[in-house]
């Protein structure tokens, strides 16, 4: 489990200075403060004296409204409200639209060791950009032993014990024209509210380990069209050894699901046995998933046909085959 | 679940050949092996997975083994790492 649920102001600056057009203008000692929420706050009401809702460890965005309001305050009152906001252990202040900070803000932030950053973007654009970035950065994440493939545009996560043939199956799928996202290990991020995005760890990206062949690079061997950087996960296939004691799905009428990071995904339990070409079966599973997403369930439709046939026979008492 | 903390002692750290030794050993046993290090986890039967841990000299690995033959495997794994994967013989 990769659990990293905060970001420091320094990290935000290092990674986003260019995109968000950021510069540090005061409070350099506060760069190691943590940001724990992807949501930003505009402390307008706090400046007017209502401090109850100021949240710790959040970014405070100051736009034109906030700065011009501060300028209407007396020097003493301005110091007082900023002091109170700083005491709420906020992450940092970011001024938008290249606004310059009032001297009281610089003084209070240097005193409380809170960084003041300035962005050239206007508030609405800035808030949109930083929220997307922070949501991705602070998303719940985990890593799973498995293979993630893009099959006909569907993200299919193949799970199963080691040496059950996940990588071999993935290679088969790649040869059939599908795209590899990651083999062996998949990092999964939750993008609120319910999207799971999988990608490979940087070091082993596009590599695959096959028994007998060793480590190979799929991008080099099959080209850029055989790989994908990341993919939304839409279907989970669990490969398992065929056990005679287990009754596998024969109809496909009941939808199974599995839960990853609190999100339910459709699950197919796929028994592995000699003579079963897993790649083709998984490919068909992806096709069937496409069909289901467009509202058509083969199994249910078939079941309805059988039901109709049975009702007709019961009504007419006819023994032979009834044609529509 | 039996667990053991082992520190990487060979100079080169957990490189590809070392990782493959762990995997080869783990695959002789039926137990499931998870290796945790610095908030990262990897399946002990996957070479690529182990390599993502980028465990250099001095890194602590937590082996988490689950299964009937877990205790024996755990001892063997610790022994392999303590023996520096058969490297650094000269010192």
Image (cartoon, coloured by chain):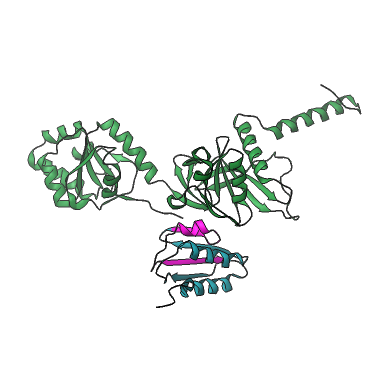
| Residue A232, horizontal then vertical, whole percent | 50, 39
Determine if the magenta segment contains residue A179. no
Q: Colour in which chain A is shown?
A: green
| Residue A4, horizontal then vertical, whole percent | 38, 53
Residue ranking furthest to the left: A75
Q: Colour in which chain B is shown?
A: cyan
**Residue A131 falls in image quadrant:** top left
Q: Is residue A294 above or below residue A8?
A: above
Q: Nearer the viewer, residue A82 or A18?
A: A18
* Count of marks overlaid on the render: 0
Determine if the magenta segment contains residue B57. yes
Mark yes or no: residue A195 visible.
no
Direction from residue A127 to residue A307 in the image, left or right: right
Q: Nearer the viewer, residue A73 or B66?
A: B66
Direction from residue A214 to residue A66 in the image, left or right: left
| Residue A220, horizontal then vertical, whole percent | 49, 45
**Residue A101 falls in image quadrant:** top left
Direction from residue A85 to residue A19 in the image, left or right: right
Q: Nearer the viewer, residue B80 or A139?
A: B80
Residue ranking furthest to the top: A324
Q: What residue sits 63% from the left and 65% below the top?
A: B30
Stretch of the chain drawn in magenta = B40-65
Position of the C terminus of chain A by quadrant? top right
Mark yes or no: residue A169 visible.
yes
| Residue B74, horizontal then vertical, whole percent | 54, 71
Q: What residue sits 23% from the left and 49% below the top?
A: A88
Q: Nearer the viewer, residue A177 or A31?
A: A177
Direction from residue B32 to residue A126 in the image, left or right: left
Q: What residue sits 49% from the left and 66% below the top?
A: B18
């Amino acid at each position: 489990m990769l659990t990293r649920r905060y970001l420091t102001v320094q990290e935000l600056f290092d990674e986003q200075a260019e995109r968000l057009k950021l510069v540090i203008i005061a409070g350099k000692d506060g760069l190691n403060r943590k940001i724990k929420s992807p949501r930003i706050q505009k402390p307008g009401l706090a400046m007017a004296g209502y401090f109850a809702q100021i949240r710790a460890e959040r970014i405070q965005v100051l736009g034109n409204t906030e700065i011009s309001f501060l300028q209407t305050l007396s020097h003493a009152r301005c110091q007082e409200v900023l002091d109170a906001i700083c005491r709420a252990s906020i992450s940092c202040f970011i001024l938008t639209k290249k606004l310059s900070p009032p001297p009281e803000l610089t003084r209070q932030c240097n005193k409380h060791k809170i960084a003041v950053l300035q962005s050239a973007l206007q508030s609405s654009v800035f808030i949109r950009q930083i929220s997307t970035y922070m949501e991705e950065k602070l998303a719940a994440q985990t890593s799973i032993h498995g293979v993630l493939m893009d099959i006909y545009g569907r993200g299919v996560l193949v799970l199963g014990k080691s040496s059950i043939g996940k990588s071999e199956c993935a290679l088969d799928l790649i040869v059939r024209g599908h795209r590899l996202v990651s083999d062996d290990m998949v990092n999964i991020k939750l993008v609120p509210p319910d999207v799971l995005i999988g990608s490979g760890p940087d070091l082993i990206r596009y590599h695959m380990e096959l028994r007998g062949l060793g480590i190979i690079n799929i991008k080099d061997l099959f080209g850029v069209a055989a790989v994908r950087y990341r993919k939304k996960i839409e279907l989970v296939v669990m490969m398992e050894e065929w056990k005679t004691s287990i009754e596998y799905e024969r109809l496909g009428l009941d939808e199974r699901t599995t839960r990853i990071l609190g999100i339910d995904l459709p699950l197919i339990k796929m028994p592995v046995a000699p003579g079963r070409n897993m790649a083709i079966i998984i490919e068909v599973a992806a096709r069937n998933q496409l069909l289901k997403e467009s509202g058509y369930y083969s199994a249910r439709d078939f079941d309805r046909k059988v039901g109709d046939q049975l009702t007709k026979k019961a009504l007419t008492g006819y023994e032979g085959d009834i044609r529509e | 679940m039996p667990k053991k903390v082992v520190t990487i002692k060979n100079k080169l750290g957990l490189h590809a050949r070392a990782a493959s030794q762990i995997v080869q050993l783990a695959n002789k046993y039926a137990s499931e092996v998870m290796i945790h290090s610095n908030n990262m986890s990897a399946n002990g039967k996957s070479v690529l997975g182990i390599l993502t841990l980028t465990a250099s000299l001095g890194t602590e690995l937590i082996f988490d083994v689950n299964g009937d033959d877990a205790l024996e495997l755990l001892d063997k794994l610790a022994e392999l790492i303590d023996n520096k994967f058969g490297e650094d013989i000269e010192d």
